[in-house]
Amino acid sequence: MYSKLLVLIVLISYGVCFATDSDNDGMPNDWEVTYSLDPNNAADADTDLDSDNYNNVSEYLHGTEPNNVASVPTANITILIPSQLNKIQRGINASINGDMIVVSQGIYYEKINYNGKKILLKSTDPNDPNIVAHTIIDANNTASPNYVVTFNTAEDGNSVLDGFVIQRGYQGIYCGLNAAIRPQIKNCIIRNNGNYGVNYNTASPQLYRCQILKNKSWGIYTSSSGSATIKNCVIAKNTGYGIYTNNNYQITVLNCTIYGNSQCGIGSTHATIKNCILWNNVDDLANCTATFSCIKNMDEGTGNLHSEPLFVNADANDFHLQYASQCVDAGDPNSAHDLEPNGGGIAIDIGAYGNTTDAPNCYDGDNDGLADEWEIEHFGDNTVDPNDDADGDGLRNKDEYHIAWDPNESNAATIKGFVTNHQLGFKYPSIQKSIDFANNGQTLIAEPNHFYEQINFNGKPITLRSIDPNDSNSVSQTIIDGNSAAYSVYFNTKEGSGSVIEGLTIRKGSTAVLYCVDSSPTIRKSVMKEGYRGAYIKCSSSSSLLSATPYFENCVFSNNTNYGVFASSYSAPYLYGCKFLANVQSGAYCGSNKPMIIRNCVAKGNGRANYNDGGIYVGSAGHVSVINCTVVNNLKCGIVASNSSVDLKIKNSIIWHTNTCDDLINCAATYSCIKDNDAGLGNIHPAIGPNFVDINNDYHLQENSICIDAGEPWADYSNEPSPNGGRIDLGAYGNTSEATSAIDDNNDGITDSWQAYHWSNYDPNDPNFGPDGDYDNDGYTNQSEYLYGYDPNTVTTVPFEIIYVQSAPYDFNPAIGENVSLQYWVNKTCNATVDITNTVSNETVKQWFQNAAVGQNAITWDGRDEDDLIVEPNIFKIVLNVNSGGSTDSDDTKRAHLYYYHTINNLVCDPVRILPLNNEVTSINYGLSIDANTVVSIYDPDGELFTSFHVDKENADNIIWGGQKMPVTNNYIFQNGTYIIEVRLEGMREKKETTLSVLR
């Protein structure tokens, strides 16, 4: 009001309010005549009659004489557009530093350039969104180089643009390549430009309360250097980045909402981002981090949230927060928030309206969890019970408040089923809605229901489960049904192991029931059935930045029309305790060149009668380990490799088909029970079969099964119940609590079932049947034949050999008491030597001699040599040689990396030359990387030890020596020459040397 009154007074004082202006150039006719200008020629308004750098219309508006150089305009006038001048650029040209230009509502088809002017250019009310929306500067040409607004002549903070729509140029606002350009841009809507919304280049404009929308490239672009602040802005729906900064540009982004940009929300290597919402961008943050922000893509940071922000209407570009948004009061507690309604609550709101009067008024006078304004809006007063269900749709008032539904309008027809957030206590009308509102680490509990929906975790580390995942009824009655859409559950946002599904039935996905791309979730105790594939796992490239290593535990994949599990290239799923049942092709397809593990699983009834598929199929690129699995009664094949060169390892398994199915095709197994008599170390082929509890349904082993304690002798069996026989069982329950206890009544280390199977005349008291007996007189004891799958009734023709060798760990630090263990198994008693050899120097630092027994033998190396000193860090080769009756075998494949961080630094003598008989001394100085005792040894010029002494760690920094024997005597050095000063860590080879000249 003050500025408008000032303009009116100025105009009246110069007698121009009602003057005639024939050429509409902003100067009245009589004024032009007075100064010899042409009242019918509009062009003379923009000329400079006295050449003083103020055009004629500027002199008129400022009340000076256009033909008098000494008549200099004074600043601080207001220029009105279009009532005084018809173009905004003419107003800028007529202004001087300190002036204000006020633009009325309308569309101004022009491009403007501040030309370095320190002026305020504003709409009639920049704080009124309706006025701003109707005060438009339109370049009407989106081709280069049409910039709607240009700053390129050292404009500073006094150059202000406030309250306009900036649209339809090549770039909305263009700043030149000048670090001194620092204008303020406020309350503007910058939209629909053909390239960038704002191009900072190397300038540093400050943006406040602006909206940068739907530009055809990036919202904001910066060049090589500079610094800027962007505050309380909305940057949304641009084709490209929301904000992109190049090189070393420093940018501070505070309380902004960055939404729905088609590339990244913010891409910057030098950004400070706080109290912002980044949502629905292809990637929210690239090369930068944020704090106290709401981020959909799960970027970590202090105070960050990842739950649905609850905008009023993002589709209509209304990014105000609703009352129940978790972004309310969730910002940095140290940020000012006093401008928000009712004092701003306990902290600043996150997003573009934090610490503004546009923040939602969430005052809750009765402390019932519902904002008073919301209660009044929906119920007429603020005393409603939050636990009531006003519309009877199953959601309480507080639930509807939390998800921004109308509590008086029943949504029963759209409710999929109810899911409760265990931590928050809120109930949601669908699984996806509960995920959208969840934060990291929360657990969502789905009630028994048939949820017809597709869900996506959107990267969140949360748990979704049924009421009781251990109850089969709870699992079968809590169903996610994709209704034959492409998928029912989709992981595609780099989910990790913290994204968990537990105890659900998932069905009917036309591509896959569960589709996992570049993600590694955890799925437990769930059923995936009746889709095209039960689970489809893929990794889109071999890049180390991507992985697809989901973990499936105790899951069922059944009745899918393609595969139960399909693992394609670069994926590496781990399946433990799972069942593959009646899938039309194979139970599991393994086509990845990354290591896939199938462990303790059952595959039954899979495949087609006329095709080579079945329980497990491994493609040409497969890299698979099948461990302790039961593959039984599939239709055509048990386990199939597409060719014999496939990397497929099968062990400790039972592959058994009572039909004509081939157990193994193009592959081999070890320590397995196989009906088809496939050869392999430790394999068994009992005529009576594995002795399952039920061949059709229950694949636990009966107590007389020969598969009990028949697995690899070196495999872990610690999870089996006692008595466990000291060896792992074959099949799906080996090394689990469901393994069948071994029976060994005479405690001879061989199961009674094995002995009874092989010897019909077995007598537990006859030593010929015991571990040290050799029933078939082939030189191999019964213990050896039992361990390695030989037939104790038939002469064994295999040679004496090392059966298996393992060492662990690879890395060890002997300085803190760690050691490395070598374990080896042989099939006859023998003499063994073990050498530890430095792989660089080829020095053998340690050697053992052992009388090795049949089965397991072991040595432990503590990193010390034969002199009991810890050797220097290096990689060491462990060489095993065995000899039995002239037959030999060896293994040199194992390595151990010995390391420690103890070092002696900067060993010096000061001085480096002494004459002891003149009482001269030297100071032996050295540093240690840790506190340690040391041994100092001094060698004479002939290399003989002259003296040595122990130094406690407390005294290791400065040792004085004057040539005496130690402890100190009068026995001084008697030989001239160079002496070697050696410092060694006590108990270790680690040492350093220097020299000292000694004269008599």
Image (spheres, rainbow, N blue to C red):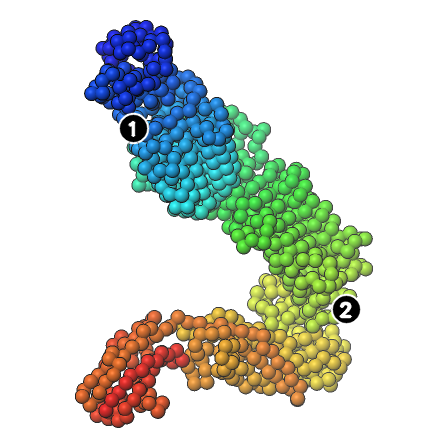
Q: Which label number is shown at residue 3?
A: none
Q: Amino acid at mark 2?
A: Asn
Q: Quadrant of the C terminus?
A: bottom left
Residue 792, how many percent across, how many down? Answer: 73, 79
Q: Is residue 197 left or right of residue 973?
A: right
Q: Nearer the viewer, mark 1 or mark 2?
A: 1
Q: Earlier in the sequence, mark 1 or mark 2?
A: 1
In this view, the residue farthest toward the left is 918
Q: Residue at x 41, y 71 (%)?
A: 900
Q: Vertical placement of 986 versus 181: above or below?
A: below
Q: Which residue is mark 1?
A: 118
Residue 207, how many percent across, how many down? Answer: 36, 33
Q: Is residue 64 left or right of residue 187?
A: left
Q: Which residue is mark 2?
A: 677
Badge 1, how many Cα within 10 Å: few under 14, some, many 20+?
many
Residue 342, how many percent across, how many down? Answer: 31, 29
Q: Say which element carries label 2.
A: loop
Give me the C-alpha separation between circle 1 and circle 2: 93 Å
Residue 429, how many percent across, how many down? Answer: 54, 34
